[in-house]
Amino acid sequence: MALFDPVVVALADHLENPGDSYAVAGKVDASSYVMGEKEFALEDGVSYDVVLTHTGDGLLVSGIVRAQATGTCDLCLDPAHLDIAGEIQEYYLFDEPDDPDAFEDGFEVIGPAREIDLAEPIADAVIMDTPFVVLCKPDCKGLCPTCGANLNREQCDCAERAAEEHAASDDNPFAVLKNLKFDEDDE
């Protein structure tokens, strides 16, 4: 299933000779995308700016995609705003290669309609620039695992209480030392 609707570029009379280039820019009107189990809202779709270059036996597509995305912080569950700026680098062949292994390298053949669909390379660039760990800010403190307080907004004393309780419990390997008596008369 495609991440975005098709972005078809008709080559028509463009790129007839090796070395010819053709610039294409536009915007994918998408409101969100999914990466794994995470969903990201797109504030204004995804803009793309690419250059198509005739290389002799194929077409090199290179450029950049940009988007403003909002996801959920993995530590505190607050909204996390991301600036996406991913690179597109894709190669299309004019004719089917003699070597069938070329398709294993990810090359596609430009069909007789002389059109290419940029939806998949745009989606790949967006996904590749989306961080695996999403944070609302680099120093996010997350949630307290005991009481659930957002430690970016408030402090709780759960960690201190847990440390004191652990120090006083018999599970602590140093608990036997709490009953140790020092003989102060032997000075």
Image (cartoon, rainbow, N blue to C red):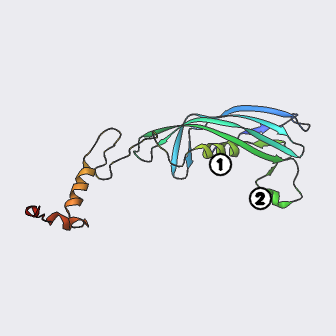
Q: Which mark is residue 104?
A: 2
Which is nearer the eye, 150 or 123?
Answer: 150
Q: Which residue is mark 1?
A: 2
Judge from the rendering whether residue 81 lies leftward or rightward of residue 3; answer left or right.
left
Judge from the rendering whether residue 49 lies leftward or rightward of residue 184; answer left or right.
right
Residue 20 figure quarter? top right
Q: What residue type is disc 2 on?
A: Glu
Element assignment for label 2: loop
Q: Say which residue appears at 41% left-offset and 42% top-offset.
A: 140
Residue 179 figure quarter? bottom left
Give percent across and percent down for residue 170.
20, 67
Which is nearer the eye, 156 or 101?
Answer: 156
Give percent across and percent down for residue 68.
56, 34
> Real-space Cα distance between discs 1 and 2?
20 Å
Image position of 187 with respect to 128: above or below? below
Image position of 21 with respect to 163: above or below? above
Which is nearer the eye, 43 or 174?
Answer: 174
- Looking at the image, is mark 1 or mark 2 earlier in the sequence? 1
Give percent across and percent down for residue 94.
87, 47
Judge from the rendering whether residue 1 lies leftward or rightward of residue 98; answer left or right.
left
Q: Say which residue appears at 38% left-offset and 44% top-offset.
A: 141
Residue 88 figure quarter? top right
Element assignment for label 1: loop
Q: What residue type is disc 1 on?
A: Ala
Mark 1 residue crowding within 10 angstroms, few (<14) / some (14–19) / many (20+)? few
Image position of 170 with respect to 58: above or below? below
Q: Quadrant of the C terminus?
A: bottom left
Farthest residue toward the front?
A: 187
Farthest residue toward the left?
A: 185
Image position of 3 with respect to 17: above or below? below
